[in-house]
Amino acid sequence: MNIKTAVRLLLSLSLALAGGGCATHALWTAAQLDNSNLPARNVNLRLFAAPSDSALVVVYDEYSERHDSTGTRAYLLEESQSRIKLSRPPIFVKTNSFAGLNAIPVFFSTNAAAVPPVFAVYSTNSQSFTLSSNGKVTGPYALPVYDDGKANAERIVLTPLAAMADLTIVGGFLGYYYLSGRHVP
């Protein structure tokens, strides 16, 4: 093999490899494997308070993009706030954990003259609610929106297949180069 052919082969091979494993790269960057869980269109928000302490249970309907389904979820408000702010799943509790707790009324607006001493106002625009307790307003408290966390596991499982596809492409290129007779000086 002369130097000119060797240089062409190295340049061609480096171009093929610079594509960087197109299938593997696409799997880890462009693949639409990420899915979120977010409040459902009809959130069906319910709040419950323990009579003896300030623990609040938030119950709402959540939509899963991965499963294209809606289910009821419940979480402890205060214990979950830092996680929700970081777009992580809240600390979920069983949806029947609010049995025996006092229901807090939830309104979409509060133009009424007479309101209970403790109530919540839900904002559909921001998917959050504020709490009013004897005239003191706290919040807003955003409902959880988080990645379901399964995409990286799927990517790990699919990476060997993508790498095999990349190697097949490079091998096909080298095989074509060899069979075209360009390997002969």
Image (cartoon, rainbow, N blue to C red):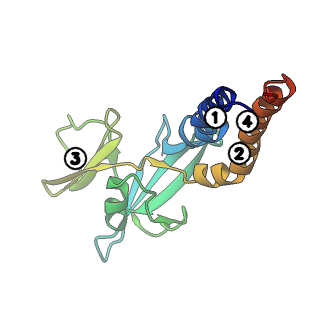
Q: Residues within 10 Å of mark 1 (few under 14, many from 20)?
A: few
C-alpha gap between disc 1 and disc 3: 78 Å
Amino acid residing under circle 3: Val
Give the residue pinned by disc 4: 170
Q: Is residue 118 left or right of residue 157?
A: left
Using the image, determine if residue 88 lies above or below residue 63: below
Q: Earlier in the sequence, mark 2 or mark 4?
A: 2
Percent coordinates x, y for residue 53 in the rendering: 29, 75
In depth, the one of 148 and 5 nearer the eye is: 5
Q: Which mark is residue 152?
A: none
Describe the element under mark 3 as helix, strand or loop: loop
For label 4, count other residues whose C-alpha is less than 10 Å away and answer few (under 14), some (14-19) or many (20+).
Answer: some
Quarter of the picture containing the C terminus is: top right
Circle 1 or circle 3, nearest the eye: 1
Say few, some or many: other residues with alpha carbon within 10 Å of mark 3 (under 14 / 14 to 19 / 20 or more): few
Instruction: Please report whichever mark, 4 or 1, sits nearer to the chain's N-terminal start.
Output: 1
The residue mark sitting in front, 2 or 4, is: 4
6 shown above or below 78:
above
Name the residue that disc number 1 marks. Answer: 10
Q: Give the CA distance from mark 2 to mark 1.
A: 21 Å
Q: Position of residue 100 (x, y in %)?
A: 46, 70
Three-letter amino acid code at disc 2?
Ala
